[in-house]
Amino acid sequence: MAEHIVEAPAPGKVLKVYAEAGKAVAEGDRLCVLEALKMELPIVAPVGGTVKALHVAPGQTVEAGDPLAVIEG
Amino acid sequence: MPEGELLGVLALTWQATVMLGIGGLLIYLGIARQVEPVLLVPIGMGIILANIPLGGLTDADGFLAVLKRAGIDTELFPLLIFIGVGAMIDFGSLLERPYTVFLGAAAQFGIFGAFFLAYFLGDGGLRLFDFSFEDAVSIGIIGSADGPTSIYVATVLRSRYAPAIVVAAYSYMALVPIIQPPIMRALTTDAERRLAMPARTQKVSPRTRLLFPVVTILVTGLIAPKATPLIGTLMFGNLLRESGVLERLSQAAQNELANIVTILLGLTVGGMMLARDFLQPETIMIYVMGVVAFAVGTAAGVLFGKLMYVASGKRINPLIGAAGISAFPMSARVVQKVGLEANPHNHLIMHAAGANTAGQIASVVAGGAVLALVPFFA
């Protein structure tokens, strides 16, 4: 079991969060949507597995490289 | 019936009717289709006002004629707009990725592509169209993908096609999402498009952000003095933004100043589109060469991106080169979209924004360089 940290690709605001801590996700599932430069960036799971930790909530601002979620799979 | 009433209807030529239709079309595109409404609605209304027969707005002391003398002939409006643009732009994405400067420079190649074509079709070769050397240079500047720079250069060079050039430049900026993706896909491989780039970058200090506009004015001004009015106003606006103590002025530049000048500039540019000047084969040709300018600029940016892809050991995605044309932030968004299509984990937006803001500076420098070079060739 390896842990994958999903990082914010750009500084921006978290618009929606789809992932839930403890729940399973498949590779390519949407975890959350960020807004940067007035554009929506869908963040998808890099691997299938379990969402071990979720670091963001809607409305929160993030910096590039901030961890958004940790997936174990 | 008092004398003079209804004379407008009688004086309406078919050419003026066509212009009224074009004005109406721009207003429609702006409002119903939301194509650059901030520009197209004032420009469309300017066209209508100027082409109503006997309305007198473009006569010697007419409203639109006065605005043209005060704001366009003096080059005042584009420079005032640039103060607002400078205050709006966050150059952080460029400063964190200094190499994107080269992509901004490479994408200015569209200027030369369109210039050579216009000059060849005009006085420099076939003489099919009435394009002087100065007109060809002004048409080339559409390739800078920057409205104020296009207005500035076309006015300084006294090109009679300035209104068509400006409208072409702004129309194609709105069409960037249609023009760019096919070229980007054609010139890159799937493996190149899929390449994800790291999100984390070295953060730049507030001091660097503050020094950047001042240093840019000095360096650019001393190398390409003719670019000083453009780069000077752009970077003055950016200094207001980054100073940290001029929030009021920064907001005023971004909102009040930029909005008021946009209204006046749009109306005036529209008012310069009189039927007798606009309805000519040259106008259509300017539109054709505008596409060439945008396409060549995009291709040059992507090709230079491929060079950096190889030189960096496959760490730079060549797509971000397309954002080197300055259409900000449209082309950065296009890059993000095309990159994400190839790989759902590939978010290129901030890298593209770096190339995009670099393109903004490069287009201004290119405008200044062109103005400096013209006297040697004309």
Image (cartoon, coloured by chain):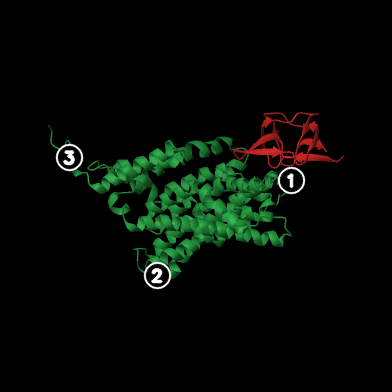
Q: State the green chain.
A: B
Which dot marks residue B7? 3
**What mark, if any, has residue B124 been given in the picture?**
2
Mark 2 lies on a secondary structure that is loop
Picture coordinates of residue B221 (x, y %)? Answer: 55, 58
- Inspect this view and state whether residue B61 appears: no
Seen at 25% across and 41% down, the residue is: B55
Horizontal and vertical percent position of residue B33: 45, 38
The residue type indicated by label 2 comes to Gly
In the image, taking residue B162 as reference, residue B356 lies left or right, namely right
Discs 1, 2 touching: Cβ within 8 Å = no
Q: Quadrant of the C terminus of chain B?
A: bottom left
Residue B200's mark? 1
Judging by colour alone, the chain drawn in red in this rendered image is A
Q: Residue at x 47, y 45 (%)?
A: B80
Quarter of the image containing the N terminus of chain B?
A: top left
